[in-house]
Amino acid sequence: MVWAPAGRRARNDTHSAPEGQSEFAPRGPLAPASAAAILRTSTRYAAVSEEAPLSALPTVLRPKGPIVAGCEPEARIQGRAGVLLLHGFTGSPWELRPLADQLLDAGYSVAMPLLPGHGTRLEDLDGTGWQDWLGGARQALDWLAPEVDRVHLVGSSMGALLALLLAQQTQPKPLRSVTLLAPAMALAPPIAAAIRLMAMAGRPRILRKDPVPLADGLSPPAYDGIPVRATRRLLELMDVVEATACPLKVPAVALHGRADATIPYSLARRRIAPLLGRGGVFLPVEDGGHLLLRVEQTPSVLARLAAILAVVEPYGPDAPGAIPERLG
């Protein structure tokens, strides 16, 4: 399968929102996608790319070999504001593509890497750890930052943890905001304990999982199993973030689904709230699951994200603008 980027227009005090009420109304240059448009982006991903048709991507973002169709990275420079989007554990850029498309249509520059061990073979993920995932995220940021005036970080699940660590490090360009979608702050204690025991025992190596059904009846392009060793390294990443992350000094927002069966809502909220910094916002997504950009609530999530960007980018992606101190 040969992939080429789809054609797009090129244009140069932590608190929670009240239940059932968003602090942001859709406004600004990002128009939220409709549910029908989001569902049209889904296809039945099963084939594996036999070639590496990635010449349009920068070298640092090109996967080293064949990848699962639907897991393709994205890289585009167009606006003076750039957004780095980081996917989750066992996932791929597919999780974030609705937001990436919305950003690109609005004129933002985008880097959305396929993190090491993902989107290829399950065995590849088994041989990687959190340092590899962070290294892949850092490479993408190092490519994006020199091309733009300012950077926004967006992370989903494990990608949210990587975004938190990147935000702690010295940035080559001003960091404008951090957005965390279903941040994987911790697994439920019994599950985490079981993972550690299985990792110590060395068996089983792989935990099988059923595909996650989507609203359109299809399945996401994700692995059908979870390597125990890699999951143990994900737990290590959670520990590193808990031990080292400091409150963010830029506008920050976290969104988490109340129906998230992967990362419990109450646990995530308790652990992420202290890291959002002065004026950070935690927004519940009613009935939302773990993949917030691939659920029935996705249009409303995209609308919230559009409104947030309208606050931190009041003049749009091609113009300079003051950095607000808080979102709420």
Image (cartoon, rainbow, N blue to C red):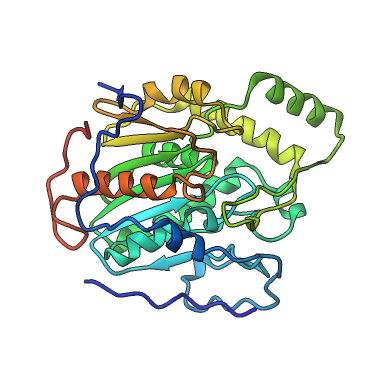
The x and y percentages for residue 295 are 51, 47
* Picture layout, residue 87 above or below residue 21: below
For residue 238, above or below residue 78: above
Task: Specify whether 114 is left or right of 68.
Answer: left
Is any part of residue 257 visible from this angle?
A: yes
Q: Is residue 30 above or below residue 69?
A: above
Using the rendered image of the protein, determine whether residue 172 is visible from the camera's viewpoint: no
| Image coords of residue 1 (percent x, y) | 65, 78
| Count of numbered circles in the view | 0
Q: Is residue 51 left or right of residue 55?
A: right
Task: Give coordinates of residue 121: x percent, y percent.
Answer: 74, 58
Q: Nearer the viewer, residue 195 or 258?
A: 258
Left or right for 120, reference 181: right
Question: Residue 274 appears at what percent x and percent y?
Answer: 37, 21
Q: Please report the residue visible at 45 percent of the width from the left and 24 percent of the height from the top.
A: 269
Identified at 63% across, 36% down, the residue is 234
* Quarter of the image where the C terminus is located: top left
Q: Place residue 236 in its image quadrant.
A: top right
Near-viewer residue (143 or 52): 52
Q: Residue at x 25, y 25 (%)?
A: 278
